[in-house]
Amino acid sequence: MPPPTQATQSTGPALELLVHGVGGTTPQEMLVDPRTVRVTGDATAAIYRRSGDIDAEQHPERYRDRPIPEAYCWSNLTSGNGSRALWLLLLPFMVINLAHWMRPAATGRPRTVRLYGALVRLVALSLTVLLTAAACEVALDLTAWQCAGVAACSDQRSWLGFLSAAQGGWWSQPGRRLALAALVPTALVGLLWYLSNRTWSAYESQRPLTGAFPDDDDSAGTAPAEPLRPALGRPGFWFGRRLVARLRAAHTAAGFLTVTASVAGAAARHDRAAQGSVPAVYGRVIEALLVLGMLVVLWVVCRRGRSERRLDNRLDRAVITYLPGAALTLLVLASVHAAWSRPGWASSGTLPGDITFRVVTLAQGAFVVALAAVAWRLYRRGPEPRTVMRGLGGPSVAMLACALGGVMTGGVAQRVADWLDGPGSPGMGRSAVIEGPPVLLSWQASVIPVLLVLLLLPGAALGVRTYLAARSLEPMVDAEYQERRPDPARTKQIARTRATAALTDSAPGIVGLVSGATLLLGAGAVGGAWASGQVPGLAMDGSSPFVESVAEAAQSTGSWMIGFGFLVFVACGRRAYRDASARRTIGILWDVGTFWPRAAHPFAPPCYAERAVPDLASRMSGWTARTRGRLVISGHSQGSVLAASAVWQLPAGTRRRVALLTYGSPIERLYGRWFPAYFGPAQLHGLHRSVHCWRNLWRATDPIGGEIRLGEESGPEVDRGPLKDPLVYGRTPEHPLPEPVLGHSDYQADPVFAQERAALLERLTPLLPQQADESRQELREVPGGPPGTAG
C-alpha cells in the first residue's frame, strides 16, 4: 500500500488525472493537444502530459484557474499487438473467471464463501479437461484411430500414409499411432502453460508499493494485524501470484493427465481383453497412477483460494515444480506402453474414450447446480434488491462458460470429422467411411437450433417492449426541449436512443433464460446420448416421419451451426491479427472481461487491472505527498472503475486529498449489480464517505453508464443527471449544424463537465488539524466476505 499523504495547510497546485474507457484512446485525444510527453510508465501503460505542462509544479502561478491535466493510457494492456487477437479462443476461460467474482455479498459465512470459490474453480478445471479432450478427439480418435485405420480415408490423404494400417509400416499399429498423435494435445497444453506464465510476467508481476506491511500471507502469525478494509482496498487484492501459480500447475497437470487417459485407456483395454506380449498389469499400474494424479490435482484446486490481506507472493514450490512434471512423465510412460508391439491389434469404430465427454458434461451440470444452491444461500443471508437474478448471476455465467466451451470444442470435432469423411455424414452410416465424433457431441449440436427457437419469443417480446417504451418517451422529449414546432423524426430518434439504452437493464433476464434453457437442454442431450447410443437422426428411426425429419434437421443444422460458430471465432481472430481497428473492437470485450484477476482459471487472458490500479494508486499517492496539492481523478466508462479501485487502494489520509469524478460509469449499473460483494451498496457508501468528494455524471441515452444510487445518508449527493443529450434539439444560431446524440461518448463536450470539475476542486479545501487526525483512521470492514479470502 502506498504511504499516506501528510496533512498540510497548503492547497498547492491542482492535478486532473484522466483515465479513458473501453476501446482506448490516444494521449493526444485525451489532452486535446498533438504535443504530448510521457511522464512515467512504458509503452504498455503510461502517464502523459502536454509538452507545455511538463514543469507545471515549478510554476504554480500558471495554474491558479485550471488544473494540470494528465492522461493515463492503458489501452495497450488489452488491444496492443496482433498476437493478442488469439485471446479470443480463451473466451470460455475468461467467462468462468467472471463467475468467481459474481458471488452475492454476505457476512458471517466464510465457509460458504470458500465453497463458492472452490466450486467455480472446479468448473474451470472441467473446461481445461474439456478443451484437452477435444484436442485428443481430433488428433487421437478422428485422425490416428479412425481415419488412419480405414484405407478409404487414409488413402485420400497422403500426409497420413505412414500411419495407415493398410500399408503395414512401423507406425501402423494403433498404439504407436496414438502415441505419435498425442504430441498435438500435449503441445496445446504446453502452449497454454507458456502463455499463462508469459502473460503473468508481462502484465501482473509488477508488485504494488507495500509501505509498512510485510510481504507475507495469512498464515504468518507473527505479522502485525492489518486494519480491516473493503476487499478492493486490501493490499494483496491486485497481486495473487500464489494462487495463479498453483492453478497453472494444476491445470497443466490435468491437461497432461487427460492426454494420458486417452493414450493409455485404449492399450489397457486391449491388454485385458486379449493375451498378448504386454502384461495387463502395466496398464493397471498406469491407470492407478492416473487416478492418483487426478486426485492430487483436485486437492490442489480445492485447497486454497485467494489470500488478499497481504501480497500473495509466496510460492508452493513442490506443487508448481513437481506436479506438471510428474504428469508429463506419466504421459511419456503411457506413450511408451501404448507403442509396445502388439501384433494383431487393429483399430475399429471410435476410440474407447467417449465416456470422457459424458463425465465432464455431467460434472459441469452438477457443479453449476451446486453453485446455484450456494449462491442462493449467500444471497438469502443479506438480500440486496439490485443484485441480478437474486444472486444467481455467477451460476448463470458459469453455465454460459460451459456452453461456450462445448460449442468451441464440439465445433472443432464436427468440422474435422466432416473434412476427413469427405461427402459422407459421420455418425449417420450413409456413405460415411469413419464413425465420426462421440455421439454426445452430435446431441449437443442438435439442441442449438432448439435453443434459438426458444429464444425467439422473449426476443420478440423485448423488441415490442422497447418500441412501446420509445413511443411513450416521445411526449417527454418534446416537453423537455419545449420546441414550438417539434420535428417528429428528431423526437423519435432521441426517444428510440433512450429506450434502446435501457435494454442494458434487461440483460440479466436474457442471461438467466439462456443459462436455464442451456442446462435443461444439455441434460436432455446427455440423457438421449446415453439411452440411445446413436446420433439423433438414427435414434429417432422408427418413430413418426415428422419426428424423424425434425431430428435429422436439428442434427444437420446444429452440426453446421456449431462448426460455423467455430469458424467465425477463427476468422475474427485472424482479422484482428491483421487489422488494428478490428483488434481494437475485440479489445473492448477484454476491457470488460479481464478487469478481474485470474482467480478461477489460470489460462484466462491476463488481468490488466493488476497493472493499472497500482499504477494509478502510486501516481496519486506520490504526487499528493510530493506537492501537497489537490487531485481530481477523472474516469470515463471502464476508466471510472479503475479510478474507484485505485482510490480504494489509497490510505485514508491520501483519500482525503482526492476528489473522484466519474462519467458514463458502469460502477453501479453493471458492477454493482453483477459483482455485489465488491461494488455493492455497502462498498460504494464506504467509498463515498472515505473520499473527499465524488461526483458522477450520466445520461439517459447512455447504454453503459448510469447512476451510483447513493442516498443522502452517505453525505453530499453524488449523481448529476440525466444530462441533456443532445444538448440542442435543432438548429440554432449558436449551433447551426445538427447536434449528435452522444450517448456514451464525449462527456467533456457538455458544459456541466467543466462546472462539476471546478466545483470538486473548490471543495478540496485545506485539511484542518482535527480532520487530519480523523483521516489517519482506516475504514472498518464492509460486508462482502471474510477478511483475507475471496473464496
Image (tube, rainbow, N blue to C red):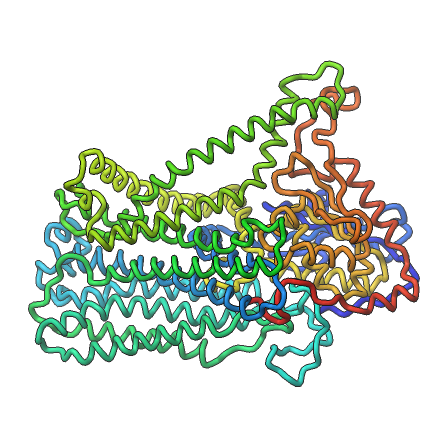
Question: Residue placed at 36% from the left, 52% from the top?
Answer: 406
Residue sitting nearer the eye, 712 or 56 = 712
Looking at the figure, which quarter contains the N terminus?
A: bottom right
Q: How many marks?
A: 0
Residue sitting nearer the eye, 257 or 120 = 120
Question: Residue placed at 39% from the left, 60% from the top?
Answer: 366
The percent position of residue 30, horizontal first and vertical second, equals: 70, 45
Quadrant in which residue 594 is drawn: bottom right
Looking at the figure, which quarter contains the C terminus?
A: bottom right
The percent position of residue 453, horizontal first and vertical second, equals: 37, 36
Residue 675 sits above or below residue 539 on the image: below
The percent position of residue 660, horizontal first and vertical second, equals: 76, 52
Of all residues shown, which one is farthest toward the left?
Answer: 344
The percent position of residue 251, horizontal first and vertical second, equals: 41, 67
Of all residues shown, which one is farthest toward the front?
Answer: 380
Residue sitting nearer the eye, 81 or 696 = 696
Residue sitting nearer the eye, 68 or 504 = 504
Of all residues shown, which one is farthest toward the bottom?
Answer: 222
Residue 217 visible to the viewer = yes
Residue 645 sits above or below residue 431 on the image: below
Lateral position of residue 627 relative to residue 303, left or right: right
Lateral position of residue 288 relative to residue 655, left or right: left
Quadrant in which residue 365 is drawn: bottom left
Residue 181 sits above or below residue 492 on the image: below
Question: Residue placed at 18% from the left, 80% from the top?
Answer: 281
Lateral position of residue 344 relative to residue 298, left or right: left
Residue 55 visible to the viewer = no
